[in-house]
Image: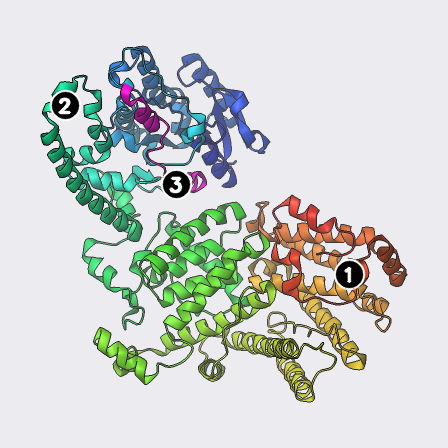
Amino acid sequence: MSKTVLITGCSHGGLGEAMAKVYHAKGFQVFATVRNMAKAGSLADYDGVEILELDVTSAESIRHCAQTVAKHTGGRLDVLVNNAGVNAIVPLLDASLDEAKKVYDTNVWSVVAMVQALAPMLMQAKGVVCNISSVSGEMVFAWAGVYSSSRSAGTRISETLRLEMAPLGVRVVTVILGGVQTSGNDPNNIADLELPPGSQYRKIASVIDRHKKTMVHPNKQKIDIAAKNVVDDVLNGHGIFIRRGQASTLSWLCNTFLPYRLFTWMINRECLRLKRKCQPSESARRRHVPMAEESDARIARLEDKMESLLAAMQTFTSSFGPLAEAIQPLSTSNAALENIPRTDFSARPALSSATVSTHPNPSLQSRSYAASPTASPPNQADEQLEYFRTRMLPYFPFIGLTETTTHDLRQNRPFLLRAIHTVTTLSTQERLIQVEELKRLLFTSALLEVKSSMDMLLGLLTYIAWSTDPFLGRADLVSRLMMLAISLVYDLRLFKPSSPDVQVMMAISQGEAEEPSQHLNAETLSSLLEKQRAVLACFILSSNLSSHLGRQDALNWTPRMEEALHILTLNGPCPTDKLFVSQVRLQLLKQKAENVRQLEETECAHTGTAPATISLPQLLYLKTLRRQLQELRSSFPSDLSQTAFSMTQPLNISGRLGFERLECLWQSVENIKSWLDSFGAIHCSELIGQPFHFWSQMIMSLTLLKYLSTLRDPEWDCQAVRNAVPLISTIDSMLQKLDQSRQQPELQCNDHLLHYISKLLTRCRLWAEARWDMTCPMQEANVLSARSPDATSHNSYIPDLDQIAWMQSMDLGDDQWFDEVLSIPTAFD
């Protein structure tokens, strides 16, 4: 039986709704309550989510809700989330006591009422109560006396419940929530401030209104990220206090380490500067103008200092976010402390000195990545690492992780561990949350702190290799991450040894050479091979992205890389090094063929002529490459033939004549057939672990097959292509294999990559079935030509892949993209 959760306050656009979706994605039966059923939003469309109408201030409504839940669950409830709350921004002198009591009824007493009503079910399940409070309960804000005091009281109630329910087997946690982007915080959804006619604050009503509409605190965390973090922390038992949202940790730091009056002044300084506007006496202000100006100057100087202090503290919490998240109030239980990353204050010097990636002690590198706020619990982290090592890495084995443990990675390669957690998250919705955290760490380390480390490079390459972004409308992100990885290769000087002048400059500026001999002598074989695999992997990925997206050039092949390949060939200690070497050599042949094509295009551009024929040296070179390709393929053992595949790109042959052109065209058909045969030989359980370039080649193969099957040329036999590799039956067999793969237990979500690939193939098949004339391709060409004057020119040549618009804009998660692309009658693009 699936676990159950009841969440109050699930109106559309709020944190409750976002948490309900996260719990639902984790397999929970969700009871989402709203006060107004019209505000349920999209939750009603989710199977496994029950929408209940509930007024948390009504005892009768709570009783009826508890009865409904008990009827559905058999008297058990695993998680209760008291999320319902209301805001109130008004000066205390103008506050209505009746309205203030309503705020307390919702923010304080409803927590007690809900726990009282559901306690038997919680005790039956040994469940968890999660009470959502706010950083406002820790601060003294002007104009927010009613709201902040209710949150402070709610926190105390939650803490008391924790003590009283622990003997009953129920765990109670308190969430101190910072700034989060919800519909309730949207200024457009907040009514204007209304003050009574006699209010002392009417002159500054606009300022108070800005506070009410949260416009003074514009920086807020995305709601999906906050919800995912809170749910993970609750389920994983991360302490009795959970701090999530913008400035939640900063609030505790300031409350703990700054004097009370100073902190209160800092967060209310705008209000204090307005105090003279509330004074009615104009003459009194004139008498004290000199004193006021001097006071203003002192305040301005103090503000400058405090701004510097705040900036420093914010830099501290962003740069050492994991450490700050680990610092919890002193009341945190020992059990909670065991889940906190083992990073103490004595490690701070190592943190600051870890910016030099060539440090001889790898354990001192990149400590600032340690355990991010969304880090996985120990058991889950071990499972993800094992899944990556056994189900994904074998198909692109550029890292040696044979005996590496999660603990080892957390200590020495924390960013790589974060990337592994991201790529092993198969649900697209959940992965997006992980990606945001990964991007934040990258931005902080690579741009703000300007670090370069092997940890960062390996993590980047891991994410790029198994990224789904190019297929989901985020090709720009992968392209830019690839450029960052290439820049790290250059920064770490992995592509070639340092020249003498660089070593001299490093010795002058930093007191030692960049690659001193003692470091080289101390460098282990494992570290050397790790760097060599990384630079070779960077070459493969950049070459594939270059051909697939056309937005950047591949990493240049250098003699140092050739040496690295030779060393791995002779001395690779990992069993998978032989496969990785074969993949590199295949990609190198493909890139060399691409370089020939680019050279030819450059020569034609200079001379202003069409590529009527290929030069004799280029032809001989291509023949040599083709022979090397055949030799390499024939050298593959049977256990490598299914994974060490590649497809050479067809040259730009649109202007060539005669046998040479036809030979190239038919070679492309043979290449596609060879790739599809390799695809058919792969077991369905192995598809989910394939890297990005596998799926890229699959889409390229089908695209080129479509062009070769419809190429309008009197010398080209389209029917022969269709007989050799029939498009529709090929799609059918691929769909069948994908459907079998989707039965794997880890693919029970409906937003994984294979789901989207199947969607693409299904739509392509419908397109082909509606427009395909298997018996008379030339008749089809004539009909299409009559319909569209552009059809003849379109189907008379094969464009470069980076010129096919639909491949550049691919978004398999967007139905509108499918309609725009596959509704065109003449071609995919």
Q: Residue at x 34, y 28 (%)?
A: 210
Q: Which residue is mark 3?
A: 221
Name the mark on residue 285: 2
Judged from the image, the secondary structure of the residue bearing numbered disc 2 is helix
Q: Is residue 175 left or right of residue 669?
A: left
Disc 2 vs disc 3: which is toward the camera?
2
Disc 1 vs disc 3: which is toward the camera?
3
Residue 311, image x, y percentages: 25, 47
**Mark 1 and mark 3: span between their CA atoms?**
47 Å
Judged from the image, the secondary structure of the residue bearing numbered disc 3 is loop
The one nearer the camera, 706 or 752, is 706
Labels 1 and 3 touching (C-beta < 8 A): no
Residue 322, image x, y percentages: 31, 50
The one nearer the camera, 15 or 166, is 15
Amino acid beneath label 2:
Arg
Judged from the image, the secondary structure of the residue bearing numbered disc 1 is helix
Q: What are the residue bounds of the magenta stretch?
A: 203-231
Q: Residue at x 35, y 47 (%)?
A: 373
Q: Specify whether residue 207 is painted magenta.
A: yes
Residue 558, image x, y percentages: 47, 81
Amino acid beneath label 3:
Gln
Q: Is residue 737 left or right of residue 158?
A: right
Q: Is residue 501 left or right of residue 818?
A: left
Q: Which residue is mark 1?
A: 727
Q: Earlier in the sequence, mark 2 or mark 1?
A: 2
Using the image, determine if residue 461 lies above or below residue 296.
below
Using the image, determine if residue 38 lies above or below residue 510.
above
